[in-house]
């Protein structure tokens, strides 16, 4: 029977519950336990797939095609396990399922209520995560903050779940803010006390309290929190801001978090294997020199919109011995006229995925600048489509070539070199209607893609509706564009590249989702190596 750990947050949001949960998962896996992770989001959207990245950050896609919370990316990167659609659910999806059942008459005319129906549905999703993964330990993060009205059913479900599972099978970790008050020259414990009081009023006593702060937390402060919150002083953990999120597991390890967690669950403290994690951090610290990479997008005011891209660039940079500085460039402001001014000092240019016409012309300008000036270029999803449109316009002579996604604003007769998949033509709902999840791709021999991957068949995760229009495929290849990746049936273009260029590759997929610390994604590694070669003058 799996053991369960629930991670909650108090005082304010964005405290780092996800990093805390992922760090604990990393430590427990390093001790030889099979770990899976889950994020429960209290909002009423069915999933984050149709939410603006300004609201929610990036949408992370799992192997099986679930559009999930960005914390799933942290989980996968820290525990190095592929998660699934069972790893993330929202209150909206719970209500959607219950209402559909009520409409079918499954409740035999009975009253459908938050307790027991919503809470039972939440508990069922928790059980499924354990059963389908076969994990020894399931770590479930409850989104939001204690006291949020929408989070109450999740806390109640977790409380019930602990009672049903019996002693030693369920633990609660509460992550809370310990702010530093400059005028008083000290950190304050009162917000944590009130947060724990609120949690206890809901019937949940935390087993651990993780204190987030931008200052060191002294032993006497931890002792005070322990006294007022009814936990052992050793179970109050300090988690001050760290230079890198990847240092958090070691900080918690040094405080015995994993050992105490296993002891409370009655599990043996197996020998820990932290050598790979320490090697990654050592390589990170040993980086000499820097690379400047431009990420040209439309959500540049919120870095979390491109979180996995940032992490994948960092992983690749560390593998190359370089610190990567990411420069977010607003595609709405970028044009052919100012591209030299904005991008002239960059060692590489990356155009990430996205939806909508806003900033698309700027992405095309970035692709043109990279192609014509020999700057290493990596296109992802919409970045591939921008690269294809740019090539069609400026090499094939297809004036104004664009995507069918933006056809309404284009003059009649404009070449649509990117078009809707035939099976999508009559779809109106936006949620869950894309090519999602892992798809196979044949890599063409003798190409940059093959040199990067080193394998004839690869699998990458997708999240898009539009594809390269096969009606223009010959025109593009005759003009020199190389199609270096195709679906197994040759119907879909997966990867394109420009020959006789230091590095100009674009993928219809999202390779950033599969990058890991110490295991950089092959395309990102090849891209950063090319950028490093440009920097070094090779």
Image (spheres, helix red, strand yellow):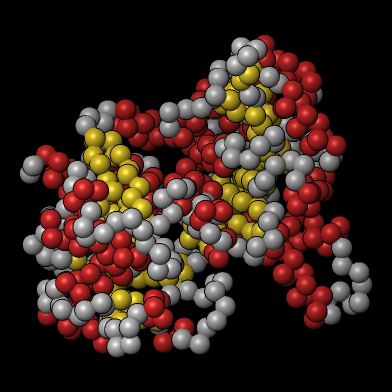
Quadrant in the picture for the C terminus:
top left
* Camera-nearest residue between 236 and 393: 393
Q: Is residue 96 left or right of residue 211?
A: right
* Camera-nearest residue between 251 and 60: 60
Up/down of 305 relative to 434, above or below: above
Residue drawn at x 67%, y 46% is: 144
Residue 317 in sight: yes
* Camera-nearest residue between 153 and 350: 350
Residue 291 percent coordinates (x, y): 23, 39
Residue 133 in sight: no
Residue drawn at x 18%, y 51% is: 340
For this orientation, the residue located farthest to the right is 110
Residue 491 percent coordinates (x, y): 31, 82
Up/down of 82 relative to 228, above or below: below
Residue 499 percent coordinates (x, y): 11, 65
Choose top left, top right, bottom left or bottom right for residue 129. Answer: bottom right
Residue drawn at x 56%, y 71% is: 431
Residue drawn at x 13%, y 60% is: 372
Please tell me how many numbered marks the rendered image carries: 0
Choose top left, top right, bottom left or bottom right for residue 180. Answer: top right
Q: Is residue 218 left or right of residue 98?
A: left
Residue 193 percent coordinates (x, y): 76, 26
Q: Is residue 91 left or right of residue 30?
A: right
């Amino acid at each position: 029977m799996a053991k369960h750990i629930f991670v909650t947050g108090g005082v304010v949001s964005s405290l780092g519950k996800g990093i805390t949960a992922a760090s604990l998962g990393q430590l427990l896996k390093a001790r030889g336990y099979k770990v899976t992770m889950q994020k429960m989001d209290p909002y009423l959207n069915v999933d984050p797939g149709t939410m603006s990245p300004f609201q929610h950050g990036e949408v992370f896609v799992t192997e099986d095609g679930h559009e999930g919370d960005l914390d799933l990316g942290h989980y996968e990167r820290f525990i190095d396990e592929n998660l699934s659609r069972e790893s993330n659910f929202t209150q909206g999806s719970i209500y959607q399922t219950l209402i559909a059942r009520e409409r079918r008459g499954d409740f035999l005319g009975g009253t459908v209520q938050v307790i027991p129906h919503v809470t039972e549905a939440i508990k069922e999703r928790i059980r499924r995560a354990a059963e389908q993964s076969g994990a020894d330990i399931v770590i479930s993060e409850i989104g939001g903050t204690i006291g949020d009205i929408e989070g109450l059913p999740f806390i109640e479900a977790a409380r019930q779940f602990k009672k049903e599972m019996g002693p030693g099978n369920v633990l609660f970790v509460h992550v809370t803010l310990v702010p530093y008050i400059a005028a008083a020259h000290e950190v304050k414990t009162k917000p944590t006390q009130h947060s724990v009081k609120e949690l206890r009023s809901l019937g949940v006593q935390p087993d651990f309290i993780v204190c987030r702060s931008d200052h060191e937390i002294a032993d006497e402060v931890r002792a005070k929190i322990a006294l007022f919150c009814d936990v052992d002083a050793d179970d109050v953990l300090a988690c001050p801001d760290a230079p890198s999120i990847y240092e958090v597991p070691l900080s918690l390890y040094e405080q015995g978090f994993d050992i105490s967690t296993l002891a409370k669950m009655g599990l043996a403290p197996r020998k820990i294997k932290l050598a790979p994690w320490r090697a990654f951090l050592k390589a990170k610290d040993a980086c000499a020199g820097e690379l400047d990479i431009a990420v040209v997008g439309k959500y540049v005011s919120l870095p979390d919109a491109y979180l996995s891209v940032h992490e994948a660039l960092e992983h690749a940079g560390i593998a190359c011995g370089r610190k990567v500085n990411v420069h977010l460039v607003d595609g709405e402001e970028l044009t052919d006229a100012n591209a030299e001014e904005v991008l002239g000092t960059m060692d590489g240019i990356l155009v990430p995925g996205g939806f909508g016409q806003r900033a698309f012309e700027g992405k095309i300008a970035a692709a043109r600048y990279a192609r014509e000036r020999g700057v290493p270029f990596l296109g992802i999803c919409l970045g591939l489509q921008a690269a294809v449109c740019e090539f069609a316009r400026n090499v094939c002579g297809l004036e104004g070539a664009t995507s069918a996604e933006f056809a309404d604003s284009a003059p009649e007769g404009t070449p649509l070199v990117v078009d809707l998949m035939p099976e999508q033509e009559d779809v109106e709902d936006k949620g869950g209607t894309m090519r999602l999840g892992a798809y196979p791709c044949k890599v063409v021999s003798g190409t940059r893609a093959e040199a990067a991957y080193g394998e004839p068949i690869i699998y990458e995760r997708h999240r898009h509706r539009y594809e390269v229009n096969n009606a223009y495929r010959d025109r593009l290849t005759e003009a020199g564009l190389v199609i270096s990746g195709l679906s197994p049936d040759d119907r879909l273009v997966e990867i394109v590249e420009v020959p006789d260029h230091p590095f100009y590759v674009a993928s219809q997929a999202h390779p950033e989702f599969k990058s890991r610390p110490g295991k950089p994604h092959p395309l990102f590694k090849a891209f950063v190596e090319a950028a490093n070669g440009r920097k070094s003058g090779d």
